[in-house]
């Protein structure tokens, strides 16, 4: 969950030596907005939330976003990778100007959670002048990649008329800066990708074989549901797990952002693997065709080598 708080101290401006080439240094390029966000209001409000979203000058999350006026600091948000739906809470007593600012800021968080993969977040971190390797939701001094991105996104949404008096998290850059313009352009690029959602696919694991996914997933998001010998068990995203049955055990390893299934059973096992992919796009058919039986592949390679040596 991301949160928004006002009145943070303004830090010293960071150098941005790693600014990427997509930033336009001359002028203020405004990307075409996306009409993909549908606001679903919980409760009532006289503020024109959907109109604010529709007027945004940069791409907004292509999904439904639930909004409620509830106390959650000044604002907070979350994104459900399974349903693909975002949620935003805005303080009950927020003025119209503050509510608009908080909505745009939190939409920035939902946008990053839905449309930006690891490489995109690294690019955003570089654009904002924050050292590489800083955790997305971590901090470097007063700088936070996630919060600074959301602040830049809010300026991209509002445009030149952004309320500079409402700047939060010590964000030092103005709308016309190369940093903010770079984030606007990054968003225009990221929204064209396949959204970050939980991907699920099934595969059969032959008895006494090992299967490994070619695709990689975000750490902590991989689970595997295994059915073998009439028993079903779920392997949580905790590195190495075991599912026992009367025909043997199945071991699942998710330590290296991949799902590796080791069968010690005498029967074929049905496995459903679920996780958020590290990079886009990840098409189900591609993932399935990319799954390899390590044992079988090694055997074929060994056989081919023997045949070559005989010649």
Image (cartoon, rainbow, N blue to C red):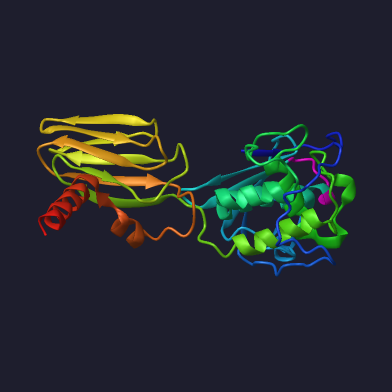
Q: Residue furthest bottom?
A: 32
Relative horizontal placement of residue 306, taking residue 103 as reference (left or right): left
Tell me the quarter of the image containing the C terminus: bottom left
x, y percent for residue 68:
66, 46
x, y percent for residue 90:
71, 43
Magenta-tinted stretch? 91-97
x, y percent for residue 135:
62, 37
Instruction: State the residue in front, 310 or 71.
Output: 310
Q: Is residue 256 above or below residue 193?
A: above
Residue at horizontal 78%, vertical 53%? 179
One can see residue 126 in this view: yes
Q: Is residue 36 above or below residue 92?
A: below
One can see residue 69 in this view: no
Instruction: State the residue in front, 224 or 134.
Output: 134
x, y percent for residue 58:
71, 63
Instruction: State the residue in front, 19 or 71.
Output: 19
Relative horizontal placement of residue 197, taking residue 68 as reference (left or right): left
Residue at horizontal 86%, vertical 61%? 160
User: Is residue 284 on the magenta stretch?
Assistant: no
Tell me the quarter of the image containing the N terminus: top right
């Amino acid at each position: 969950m991301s949160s928004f708080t006002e009145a943070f101290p303004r830090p010293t401006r960071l150098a941005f030596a790693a600014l990427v080439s997509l930033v336009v240094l001359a002028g203020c390029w405004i990307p075409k907005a996306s009409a993909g966000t549908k606001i679903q209001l919980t409760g009532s409000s006289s503020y024109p939330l959907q109109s604010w979203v529709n007027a945004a000058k940069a791409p907004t999350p292509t999904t439904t976003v639930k909004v409620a006026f509830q106390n959650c600091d000044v604002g907070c948000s979350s994104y459900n990778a399974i349903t693909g739906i975002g949620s935003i809470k805005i303080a009950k007593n927020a003025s119209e100007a503050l509510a608009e600012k908080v909505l745009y800021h939190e939409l920035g968080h939902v946008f990053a959670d839905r449309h930006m993969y690891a490489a995109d977040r690294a690019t955003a971190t570089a654009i904002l002048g924050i050292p590489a390797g800083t955790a997305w939701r971590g901090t470097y001094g007063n700088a936070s990649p996630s919060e600074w991105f959301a602040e830049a996104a809010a300026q991209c949404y509002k445009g030149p008329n952004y309320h500079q008096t409402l700047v939060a998290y010590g964000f030092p850059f103005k709308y016309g800066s190369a940093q903010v313009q770079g984030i606007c352009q990054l968003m225009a690029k990221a929204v064209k990708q396949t959204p970050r959602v939980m991907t699920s696919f099934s595969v059969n694991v032959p008895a006494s074989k090992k299967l490994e996914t070619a695709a990689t997933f975000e750490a902590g998001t991989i689970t595997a549901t295994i059915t073998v010998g009439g028993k079903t068990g779920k392997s949580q995203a905790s590195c190495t797990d075991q599912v026992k049955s009367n025909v043997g055990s199945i071991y699942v390893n998710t330590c290296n952002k991949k799902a590796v299934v080791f069968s010690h059973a005498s029967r074929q096992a049905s496995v459903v693997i679920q996780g958020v992919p590290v990079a886009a796009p990840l098409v189900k058919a591609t993932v399935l065709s990319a799954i390899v039986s390590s044992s079988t592949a090694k055997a074929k390679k060994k056989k081919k080598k023997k045949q070559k040596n005989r010649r």
